Amino acid sequence: MATLNSLNLTFDITNANKDGLLLNFSTSQPGTIPSFFRNDGITVTMRPVAPSVTTSRPWDDQNISADTVTLAIGAFDKSPDNGTWYIYSGTNQTSGTLVVGKTYQIITFVAGDSFTNVGAGSNASSVIFIASGTTPTTWTNSSILQEITTSLAYNITPAALQTALNATNWMNTAGGCTVTSTDTGTYEVQFVSNGLQSTMTGYGGFTPACSVSIYAVVAGSSSIPALQIIEIDAIPYAQTQTWTSLPSAAATVTLIAAGSGSAPNVQQVTLSPTPYAGTFQLTTSLLTTAAISAPASATSVQAALNTGGNNYIVTGSSGGPYTITTVALGSVATITVNVTGLLVPVGLTGTMNLSTYGMLQAFLDAETSTLGLFLEVQVIPVAGYPVTVLQVPVTVSKNVINLGNLSAIPLPTYYTSTQVLALIATCVGNVATPSSETDYSTLPGGVKPTGNNVYFAPRDENGIWCISSTDTTWKVISKSAIS
């Protein structure tokens, strides 16, 4: 039985506008996204393609099975309208003393330690408390604590956030900071004193659901103050990152009738999935065929098997299954099939649940029976930066019959600042500071990078050299984003 609610996405992964949805693999005609319904569960098949290097078809499959792939449905620029959040120091404490009056969270509790004498309501992971003393009863088992800010309002002003950060012991020790903002939900934290700083982390309980991301734009050094960017981003209303690769080429050989002294041998060869191109070979007790182009007719398969004489009769549809009958009577060996040359659809399949609390909240906020949203596919290569490969508008409607069980929205996978810096290091290696914007001698190979390589860019603030992954020329990086 066919899947009742399925979504087949074939799209041009090279499309510069990220809207390269196709009707199918065999045409360049644009595809149409169907309507979605809030309580439904959807089976999704994604097939990313690129313009073919051949003239026999318009597209070639692109394999992204080793990458982190996220499919999501949501809205742009949705800010929280309720809730609170915290900023963490980014530095784990596993022993020592606390500062009275400061707020802490037990990140990981290890049995044997005890913090109830210094203000913790209980000894357990995730407990938040204000330190009433300096020395826990026992802290010798490496329980992990981090100092955090006091509870922050969902719409906190830059000035109030600056006050909250500067009230923490970790920021006070670092020399303080100033906080500015040019966009709702985005804050720039400029450390006052020079020095390498740990990247802060954030966590919030927002309505609608949002995440807190913090990036170290400038890590800081003995001569440079750190700069970190805080972003409060809407979490998609529904998404999935769990995928199964589409099956690779395979062949099944089934014995239909065993040959004997009075009967011919009959075997059936089935290729799966049905190949759209490429070649395969059959090996019988008499010969190994030359490469047979797929999808092949029964006549073509028969001709390949009978190059040494009229030994086989082949029937079946183009592409198979093929029923192969020996002309001579008697038992023969099982046919084997070499499928390494076959081309079959390459892609991912998974499920997306639209019966989520986030989707329900979106409808409640909108007070309407339909929502105009966006469907997006993002790919994070094994060694590379996140790339949006598809983004198209979609409509989600309420159901007349509401039988869906609401589920929490799964959190997406984000790069931490440490991972971002590690990626940068992977891309550029150990490179000395350029002497000018046109000094490429310090780059690997001594030449200006091309394509998707990493570029240096001079900041006009403090003369710091930073990194950009997308610029085709060297220029000042915006302080409002990390490339």
Image: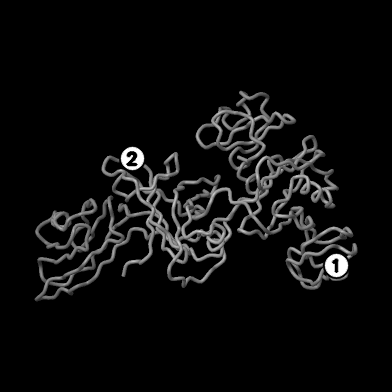
Mark linked to residue 119:
1
User: Is disc 1 placed on a helix, strand or loop?
Assistant: loop
Q: Residue 397: horizontal and vertical position, in percent?
A: 45, 60
- Judge the density around disc 2: few (<14), some (14-19), many (≥20) Cα neighbours within 10 Å: few
Task: Examine the rendered structure and indicate whether residue 129 appears above or below residue 80.
Answer: below
In contact (CB < 8 Å): disc 1 and disc 2: no
Task: From the image, tell me which residue sits under label 2.
Answer: 53
Indicate left or right for 344 with 447 as reference.
left
User: Is disc 2 placed on a helix, strand or loop?
Assistant: loop
Q: Residue 209: horizontal and vertical position, in percent?
A: 61, 58
Q: Residue 53: horizontal and vertical position, in percent?
A: 33, 40
Q: From mark 1 to mark 2, how far is it between C-alphas?
A: 67 Å
Image quarter where the N terminus lies is bottom left
Foreground of the two, 403 or 265: 403
User: Type of residue at label 1?
Assistant: Gly
- Between disc 1 and disc 2, the foreground one is 1
